[in-house]
Amino acid sequence: MAGRFRIAVIEGDTGESERLLRLLEGCSEGGLGSIEISLLESTAGALAGYPALRPDVIIFGPLAALRATTADLQQLRARAGLEPVPILFVLSERDSGSSACLQTGCDDILLTPYNPDLVQLKLAALQRFCDFNRSLQAQRNRLRRHHADLLQEQASARQIFNNMGHESCLDQTRAIRYHLSPRAVLAGDVLTAAYGPGGKLMLLLGDFTGHGLAAAVGAVPLTSIFYSMVSKGFSLSHILRELNGKLHRVLPADMFCCAVMFELDPHKGQVRLFNGGMPSACLRRSCGNLRLLESRHLPLGVLDEASIEEAIVHIPVERGDRLFLWSDGIHEARSPRGEHFGEQRLLQALSSEIPEGSVSIIS
């Protein structure tokens, strides 16, 4: 047994209370186990002493059952909270057919004259129910604590990853607008941007396979290599080769990183763009024309050796052109009816008139 089986008996008639007490004590001696019985004269007394009683079962004696109201039972259940506490009425065989008495909402009845064997069987079933409920509540509490600890660990990890991006220029330039809305504290999406020597702007949007901590950990080598090599003036192809090789060595075989990365040279008016496994990027010309830039390479980390240079496209740009990048979260967004947003709706949105602003919008 999971502890003492607590029974609260509510009955104003002293003689009936004594008969119930002897009956329940006999059930305890008959093999029901350790029982703690509390005798109460009224529902008001039970409500007042409920925090100390914490009964597993409440029994209304014959007189109390006839006087009990629906409001009385509702108040008792409210005091019990989420823990289900069965409420039994003691009725005579004649009263047991009275619907008016049963409509108050009791869970079960005990008939008089008492049959000790039947009463013991019924209480044993209720005791097993209470023990099972206790084990469920204990498991629920353990899961809640585990979930809270997991969220705290993820929040700490997220803060570490955020601190690693202190070299980012995402919030320090008017050339970029972005929005990140992960479904969880930790996700596989990563966005980095930095200026290299000579004023070249480099940006990388990546999406690691999977979710949670395992996917987010991949951002550690990716961001550290990106910021280190951009600041030293390495070319787009050199950085991508280094990223691909590093991810291939450190990631498990079933993990990789879909990525789109570009280099904007404002002096030459040129964008060099690499797309490996990400949804098509979209270049919106100042005149409103759209150009899709599809993936031309496998995701980073799939192969040890990669022909990066062949997958890079060179695009001349002018003032007023805008480059849109996004992960698969937009395509997979669903309406209340379960319909995907899809690429077609996204392109229709990009075709609409856009106010003057930044050179590149990353979404």
Image (tube, helix red, strand yellow):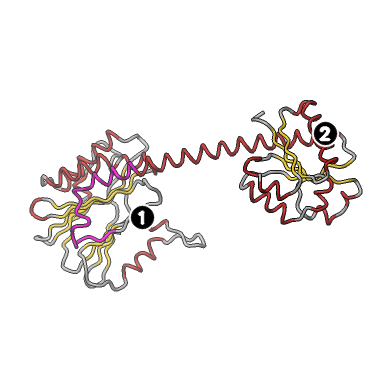
Quadrant placement of the C terminus: bottom left
Look at the image and say whether residue 95 sits in the magenta stretch.
no
Residue 275 visible here: no
Q: Which residue is drawn at 12% across and 55% down?
A: 200
Kindly check if marks 2 and 1 are in contact, taking CB atoms under 8 A apart as contact: no
Look at the image and give the residue range highlighted in magenta: 156-178
Q: Quadrant of the N terminus?
A: top right
Residue 208: % across, % down: 33, 44
Residue 170 drawn in magenta: yes
Q: Who's the residue at 72% across and 53% down the image?
A: 72
Residue drawn 30% across and 40% down?
A: 218
**Residue topped by disc 1:** 181
Amino acid at the residue labelled 2: Leu
Q: Distance between the residues labelled 2 and 1?
A: 63 Å
Residue 73: give x, y in percent of width and height: 72, 52
Which residue bears the numbered disc 2? 23
Most foreground residue, 237 or 60: 60
Q: What element carries label 1?
A: loop
**Residue 341: quarter of image:** bottom left
- Sequence-wise first label, 2 or 1: 2
